[in-house]
Image: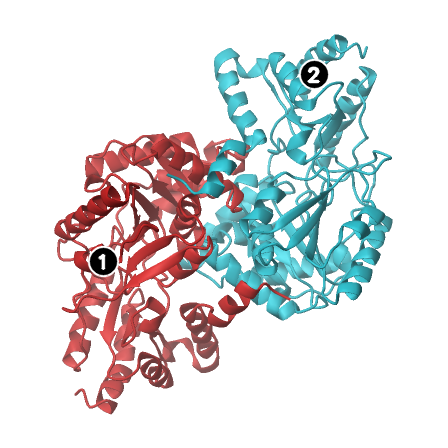
Chain colours: A cyan, B red
Amino acid sequence: MISEKMKALVRGSSVIRAMFEEGKKMAGEIGRENVYDYSLGNPSVNPPEKVKESIKKILDEKDPNYIHGYMSNSGYEDVRDRIADSLNKRFATHFNRNNLIMTVGAAGGLNIALKALINPGDEVITFSPFFGEYRNYVSNFEGVLVELPPNEKGDFRPDPEALRNAITVRTRALIVNNPNNPTGVVYSKEDIKNIAAVLKEKSAEFGAPIYLISDEPYRELAYDGVKVPYLTKYYDNTIVGYSFSKSLSLPGERIGYIVVPDEADGAKELISACNVANRILGFVNAPSLMQLAVAECLDEKCAVEVYDKNRKKLYEELTGMGFTLVKPEGAFYLFVKTPEDDGAFSAKAKEKHLFLVPGKSFGCSGYVRIAYCVDYDMIIRSLPAFRELAAEYGLC
Amino acid sequence: MISEKMKALVRGSSVIRAMFEEGKKMAGEIGRENVYDYSLGNPSVNPPEKVKESIKKILDEKDPNYIHGYMSNSGYEDVRDRIADSLNKRFATHFNRNNLIMTVGAAGGLNIALKALINPGDEVITFSPFFGEYRNYVSNFEGVLVELPPNEKGDFRPDPEALRNAITVRTRALIVNNPNNPTGVVYSKEDIKNIAAVLKEKSAEFGAPIYLISDEPYRELAYDGVKVPYLTKYYDNTIVGYSFSKSLSLPGERIGYIVVPDEADGAKELISACNVANRILGFVNAPSLMQLAVAECLDEKCAVEVYDKNRKKLYEELTGMGFTLVKPEGAFYLFVKTPEDDGAFSAKAKEKHLFLVPGKSFGCSGYVRIAYCVDYDMIIRSLPAFRELAAEYGLC
């Protein structure tokens, strides 16, 4: 009854989402305290109090038809002004409202950017491991996702040589996710400069711009003083996709934006195309009240210290048990090497009520992802299960 | 720099949206009171007070990570329960949470249903005039929108014979919009039964279900005691797309749902496909706080009397001036015959600061659409401009 393409998609579906549903079910059966659900990137930190205050203030002070009505498909002008100002202050950029489109989260933003750019058969490159939905987003527009394997060092940093070799005349874009889901690695200024050099070289060679799509929901989540570079400063043809999902703990609200700088080739045309795509893909506009609310909260800080405590504890404990992993500098994920096939390992972990997502969901077998955006207490309760698992594999 | 498909879409863009932007600009130049913007279906009635109260109550009483966090891609279970109960009470249906998916407005709902159903080249039929975005929604998935011309009587009711003749082996669905945008016509029980009979006959002939997609953002807006039939009761293979945009005056919030009844062929598979489509098209889920808020407001009534007053006044005045139009029974639109080409007429109207959308945007030249979801005072102020227009065409 459904389309051929959807049949495969329903079969494949999302392992993460399936785990999340399974975890909820198991929690109902054996008690929430006995399930260690590390599957979903659902923030455990509360949104800043200012979110609630702002929503109430907006409801009390503004005309309800302004708050809840249609506005331009790109979003409220003054909301875009305020976000542009905030970015300019933080990153010494020079955006204005016309460089921004408010979107239904980063997922909405990526989809409209891809719809704007991709002809059927065009290629979009990404470095593995990557957020598995990129496959679907690119496939929505009949594009082909080209997945570059991790470099040999295993530090999950981008490999400029591999990128150079992968670019063809059909390459329209490279998607990077910084800080990275699922590894937690933060690409440095040097990493970005290396990528930019290759993209510039290859754009010149093929006579058409290759866009850099920077998926940045984890921008505010960086640890140990690590800086997350702002990519438009290193490469003109950058489209930034941002979300308030993690920074303000609002993933259910679907609120974010994309930025297309004036320096991008065909910037005006590209912005128009993204605006039209936002409308016709069915988003129409980003949710209105939430646009107004986040504009009030641009200076709010995410309580990264909570995630940092989780990160340090889990990293220390897991390495102590003999697991191998790169110490993450951002986001709220650990990407842990599995002593056997990641699917089998994940299944064995589930027997101990540990929900860990197999790396193949991120285009990188041989690992599991641990989303540590959870209560610290759950981490403590889960350690015996991890220890048993390590012992079974003879790691400790 | 943008894809071939988007180039055409940006050129075509939305006449309605362009008018809305132009109207805002003109209002800035010559004063809001001198512009008669009838372009956009943006409710003028305030949302019920209960919307505001509910949002505040939810913010005060529930856990913020529940309010703003991820839930199942289909939406909160209890929200779907409550909507199912409400529908069952109102329409003697028997839905449960599994028949519903919360969506980013009706536009989001239609897009996920179409993604679930359409193979490239599949045909989707609709009766002209129709909401112009259907072209884009169907084209998003490489489908073909088959536009049936209005019947000869000119009453804008569906013509079952024309439908029968248009259905081919590639027909996957018929989209109806009831009450109709742009005509305001409400399809009766008889109309629906006639459509259902043809769809059943043709489904049997071609050995595959033809789905009826019912786009119902205007369901609560009906006048003169007219009833809007609930389509799942007349045809099993119905997918209902609903939105709270007009009933609760929340168009900017992007909140609605789709219903797939158990009786639909492949109902389970179809629901799964819609759920996956909701995620991968980038919606992920309907905005969370608004899901919770609308669930509190299911018994709220839209102040249809406000629109009714506008409807009566404009209908009476315009017919009095010599314009020809079908008296609308629902929605908040009038569809008026133009004495010359609708584009030329609309341009002449604009010289008098009247913003009326040409019928060709709705697949039906020779008419303009008047969205009367405006302040009554604006209607009164605009009457001299309408009268001048009528006089210029020698109508009065």
Kind of residue indicated by mark 2 = Ile
Give residue A37's position: percent from left, percent from top. Answer: 60, 22
Q: Nearer the viewer, residue B13 or B314?
A: B13
Q: x and y percent of residue B271 in the render?
A: 39, 36
Taking depth in this image into account, of B388 and B169 the one nearest to the observer is B169
Number of numbered markers: 2
User: Label 2: which residue?
Assistant: A380
The spot of residue A30 in percent (x, y) is 52, 11
Q: Sort mark 2 into few (<14), some (14-19) or many (20+) by Cα contacts within 10 Å.
A: some
Report the chain holding disc 1: B
Q: Secondary structure at mark 1?
A: helix
Cβ–Cβ under 8 Å for marks 2 and 1? no
Numbered disc 2: secondary structure: helix
The alpha-carbon separation of the residues under discs 2 and 1 comes to: 68 Å
> Viewed as shown, does residue A13 lie left or right of A372?
left
Residue at 70% from the left image edge and 33% from the top image edge: A332
Split into 4 quadrants, where in the image is the N terminus of chain A? top left
Q: Quadrant of residue B364?
A: bottom left
Q: Which residue is mark 1?
A: B165
Placement of the C terminus of chain A among the 4 image quadrants? top right
Label 2: chain letter:
A
**Residue A387 to residue B30: above or below:** above
